[in-house]
Image (cartoon, helix red, strand yellow):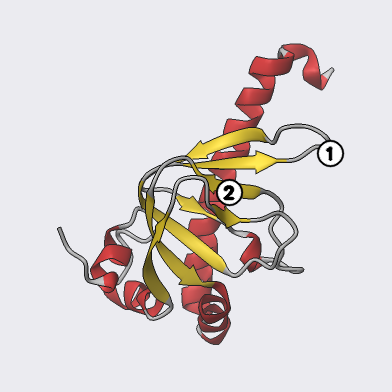
Amino acid sequence: MTENIGELVAEHPLFSGLPADVAKLVAGCSQNVAIATGQLLLEEGEPARSLYLLRRGHVALEVHEPGRVPLVIDRIGPGQAVGWSWMFPPYRWHFDARALEPVGAISVDADCLRSKAEADPAFGYLLMKRIAAVMLDRLQATRIRLLDVYGRDVAH
């Protein structure tokens, strides 16, 4: 199993199949991280400073309602990415992401990645397309969960 950060980035589904120079740009902003069970990767309201490319373990995306236990809205696992709020002002997280078990991930520095995307519009466009695809998948999954919870009459 490889531990070269460039190869790990290139192998992650978010960046696989892209030209090698793209993985190299991302790898220049990246580091391997280990996250303990229960640790927050993202905290609602805090500055959005990283993109996490999950390699192993699972993360719960949570929302809060005052006086209640956090509600898990999604579960993210290996091969998926966590966090896109770093792409859009005001660059703050909109939910929590908590490790459900030990997690191995590539943490990509958001300021570094954003500055590279702005300096290289072709790279920025590829990055935006890949992140937009993740966003669309998550929105569609949320829509299906809402239909399961509220039934098909929710739109009427």
Q: Mark 1 Cα within 10 Å, few/some/many (few <14, many 20+)? A: few
In this picture, residue 129 sits left or right of residue 45 = left
Closer-to-camera residue (22/61): 61
Quarter occupied by the C terminus: top right
In this picture, residue 108 sits left or right of residue 12 = right
Q: Residue 78, located in which quarter of the rendered image?
A: top left
Closer-to-camera residue (127/114): 114
In this picture, residue 74 sits left or right of residue 77 = right
Residue 91 pos. (x, y %): 70, 68
Residue 41 pos. (x, y %): 54, 56
Q: Is residue 85 above or below residue 115?
A: above
CA gap between label 1 and label 2 equals 17 Å
Q: Earlier in the sequence, mark 1 or mark 2?
A: 1
Q: What amino acid type is highlighted by mark number 2?
A: Ala
Residue at point 44% right, 66% down?
Answer: 107
Q: What amino acid type is highlighted by mark number 1?
A: Pro
Residue at point 69% right, 36% down?
Answer: 70
| Residue designated by label 2 | 97
| Residue designated by label 1 | 66
